[in-house]
Amino acid sequence: MRNKIFQIFVLIVGLHHLPAKSDEFDFSGYARVIGGYLDEKDVEYRGYDDTLNFSPSSLIGLQAEYQFNKNWSVTAQGVLRSDSTTVSGESGLEWLYLTYTPTTNLQIKVGKLRTPFFTMSDFSDVGFAYPWINPPQQVYDTYLFKTFNGIDAIYKFGSDDFDISIEGYYGEESGSIGIGHFKTGFEVDNLVGVIGKLNIENIEFRASRYNGNIALDLKSINQLQDTLENFNFSLSAASLTTQGSAHADQLGVIYDNLDYFFRGEWVKIKTQLDIIPIIQSYYLTVGYNDAPFTYHLTFADSDVEINANQNEIPVGVNVELDQLAQAYNSVFSESAPDSLKTWTLGIRWDVLPNLALKAEVSALEGDEVNNSFFVIPEDTNFNRKTNLYLIGLDWVF
């Protein structure tokens, strides 16, 4: 782990000496080193435990842009993560797209793009761009995918009193995601999204809607479906379908008068797949700027509504049917993202115009019935309440 952090710092220092710009070429980047400690023995949360760990969130991102002329450009961005096994995602190419700007009001992008599900989707890895060490995880670490392949168009207009932007995109994506305790491959096609933003003086409102068709690669569940069909439990088999439509609704608001700020975001995700629960998540943040320091307090919550299963399997008839019923019920319990409430108190110190130091403490309170995002040994009587301490350094260059 220490070698990984050292390699990140060496790479940062080396890149700092490269030429940043030319008339056509622009090179930039960002980096973060995040350390965390969980105040609970024998329990893990998002890659953190009761030892100081720098792996889960530390990363470096590099972006290059080439401007062919005033209308056309190409952009590429790659991210090297210290630990690709956590919820943060894998290292590799994040963006690779062509931009066409026919007018000052219209911009069109084609290629591999960030999926703009949330207010900060485009820069969720750039810690320098927001007050927290990590964006509220109940919203930003759901099972939605971060990138897609397709087309995105933004049209902007306004007056002296307001600015409006309307964004639409269409595409597809495949890869792997985590749904509860399942790690599964997925394919999404006919992904369609519409986003509207309104800016009036110091306040911004955002509303968005996303739809798509999703197919999960869960062979064990498909095999269980076949077994249920063989026993003529057709309703139970149908409830385990791994293909169907999905949609998400999102609302966001930001207010900032340079002294005080408020941020809030809400998202609801629902699919036609009974094995994927309905999830609603939100956060509310208030903060105070006293340059070079920023102080903030955040409450975040995620609530899960598990779909009713269609268990037709009689219990107590024989061992084979009992095992089948247990396997069927376990699919719904293991695919459920858990509910979690957090209070986070943090401070940010802008040491330099492009360098910030941060510290946070989060009080975590999960549902005692579920794991609530924790990794818990079976022989541990953990009440799902603990504290997470984070320190971080964020840099843009």
Image: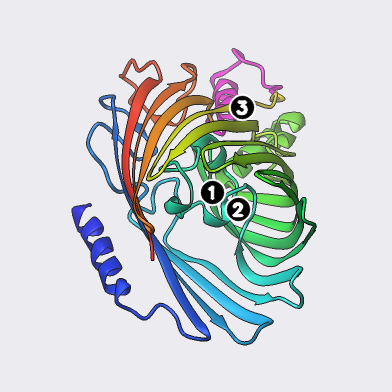
How many other residues sit within 10 Å of disc 1, few (<14), some (14-19) or many (≥20)? some
- Amino acid type for the residue under numbered disc 3: Val
Q: Residue at x 43, y 51 (%)?
A: 127
Q: Position of residue 182 (x, y in %)?
A: 51, 40
**Residue 228 horizontal side relative to residue 19, left or right:** right
Question: Disc 2 versus disc 3: distance between alpha carbons?
Answer: 21 Å
- Which quadrant of the figure has residue 390? top left
Q: Which residue is mark 3?
A: 304
* Magenta span includes 317: yes
User: Who's the residue at 79% across and 58% down the image?
Assistant: 158
Given residues 323 and 289, the one toward you in this image is: 289
In this picture, which residue range is highlighted in magenta?
Answer: 311-336
Q: Is residue 61 visible?
A: no
Disc 2 to disc 1, C-alpha distance: 7 Å
The prevailing secondary structure element of the residues shown in magenta is: helix
Q: Can you say whether 342 is above or below 88 in the image?
A: above
Residue matched to label 2 = 186
- The residue beneath circle 1 is 177
Q: Residues within 10 Å of mark 3 (few under 14, many from 20)?
A: some
Q: From the viewer's perspective, is 105 left or right of 177?
A: right
Percent across and percent down for residue 53 are 26, 42
